[in-house]
Image (spheres, rainbow, N blue to C red):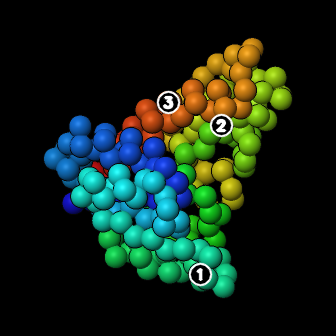
Amino acid sequence: MKNIVILISGGGSNMAAIVQAAQQQDWAGTLNARVAAVVSNKAEAKGLEFARQQGIATAVLDHKAFASREAFDAQLMAVIDQYQPALVVLAGFMRILTPAFVGHYAGRLVNIHPSLLPAFTGLHTHQRAIDAGCKFAGTTVHQVTAELDVGPILEQAVVPVLPDDTAQTLAARVLVQEHVIYPLAVANWLKSQA
């Protein structure tokens, strides 16, 4: 059985979408895969409760308890590696990861970003798209590399930018598409590893 470990920092809606897709499409049977654990850097992350309700192992590792980013990432790797993951999924995990972490999971670490990469890497993507006068925005699932938001693209979804959009209304429409393409990208990655 291929294990997936999902990292979150908040509500975990993309994590929940992946877990629900795995259940509905019987990934255990069809892809020989399961979400084995959900790990958060914040004890109050609401997504942890959803994971527990689904019978998924959870762990919390507070990044503030570590003297350096490197020390946190080293301990995070130790927690993740207990589950021998085939894939590590970043689903709203709001930490920039060290090169050592990224290298440790090279080729099996994915992220979702709320823009059509390579446009608008980093933060405040929706407002930046509106300010730039974009007619379309969207979301991208990509492999994680040492450089922020530039890894190979696995899936993308496009949404229109409407004349009266705010960053919040655009973000809400993009999030709907994130919930569609992230489970698809994970399933396609798993199929490619069969």
Which element carries disc 1, helix, strand or loop? helix
- Residue identified by numbered label 1: 65
Q: Amino acid at mark 2?
A: Ser
Discs 3/2, front:
3
Going from N to C along the chain, the mark reached first, 3 or 1, is 1
Q: Amino acid at mark 1?
A: Ala
Q: Amino acid at mark 3?
A: Val
- Residue identified by numbered label 3: 176
Q: Residue at x 72, y 39 (%)?
A: 125
Q: Is 130 left or right of 86, judged from the image as shown? A: right
Instruction: Establish if 67 lies above or below 131.
Output: below
Label 3 to label 2: alpha-carbon separation: 13 Å
Q: Is residue 128 visible?
A: yes
Label 3 to label 1: alpha-carbon separation: 34 Å
- Residue identified by numbered label 2: 115
Q: Is 152 left or right of 38, judged from the image as shown? A: right
Number of other residues with Cα within 10 Å of mark 1, as a class: few under 14, some 14 to 19, many 20 or more: few
Number of other residues with Cα within 10 Å of mark 2, as a class: few under 14, some 14 to 19, many 20 or more: many
